[in-house]
Each structure stands twice: as C-alpha cells, then as structure tokens.
Amino acid sequence: MTDRPAPKPHPVRVTCHCGGVVIEARLSAGLSTARRCDCSYCRRRGTVVVSAPLDGLRVVRGSERLTLYQWGTMTAEHYFCAVCGTHTHHRRRSNPNEYGVNLGAIEGVNPRDLGPIPWADGVNHPSDRTPG
C-alpha cells in the first residue's frame, strides 16, 4: 500500500445576494467548523462562518465589488459586496492563515439545517490576553 496525500475537499461556491461576487472556497473540514462569534462586529451581523485555508479561496468574479472593512488592530479583513452588502468572507485575526467563509452565502446550504451552532468567544479574544 502506498502512502497518498489526503484528497483536497471539493470546493464550494459562495455568492453574494445580487450575484455580482462569486467565490470558490475549499473548506478545511466541510461544515464541521461552523461557528458564530460574539465580538462587537460579528454579533451585529450574525453571520455563521466555516473555515478555509488562506490558499483555499479564490474570487472567480466581482473582486472590484468587494469592499474591505477593518477596525481595532486592523488584523482581520472583512469583505462584503459593495452593491448588496452581503458579507462573503474574512481573513481571521485569530489565525491570519485562514478565512472565515459566510455559511449562508454557500450555494445550497441553509445554516438552519445544521441545528445549534457553537459560539466562539470574540469578546475575550486570545490576541487581547496578556501572557502569564
């Protein structure tokens, strides 16, 4: 038997509401990474996200429509469609090598079908803690 690398997950299609932005994302572990966050920004928008590696996301169409929002440490990069306002993805502050992809923007997925979704503690962000 030969050791083979695990196959890369099949990419999902992520779209904004108006259809102007189309993204292809290869999720790290499918929908099993679904999380909500209670930081000051995420709790206002209520998005459920799943993880994708930094090299696992590609804007297929509409990059010119994506608007960047940052605040605080300016580490996290939150992207949304400037036309319809849909949050599509963000580069994470907790792990800048990952994207959080809006689960509700993945074609064919309804977050309600997943049942209860765990919460991440964004109020007490690990990057804000002092060592010791």
Image: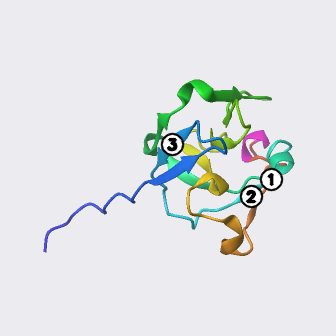
Magenta segment: does it hold 129? yes
Which residues make up the magenta segment?
126-130
- Helix, strand or loop for disc 1: loop
User: Picture coordinates of residue 10 (x, y %)?
Assistant: 39, 59
Query: Which mark, residue 46?
Result: 1
**Distance of mark 2 from mark 1, alpha carbons?**
7 Å
**Which amino acid does the dot numbered 2 rest on?**
Arg
Query: Which mark, residue 36?
Result: 2
**Distance of mark 1 from mark 3, alpha carbons?**
20 Å
Q: Nearer the viewer, mark 3 or mark 2?
A: 3
Query: Which mark, residue 13?
Result: none
Residue 34 in the image: above or below residue 61: below
- Assign the N terminus to one quadrant of the image: bottom left
Residue for point 43% across, 54% down: 11
Tell me the quarter of the picture where residue 50 sits.
bottom right
Residues tagged 1 and 3 counted as in contact (Cβ below 8 A): no
Q: Residues within 10 Å of mark 2 (few under 14, many from 20)?
A: some
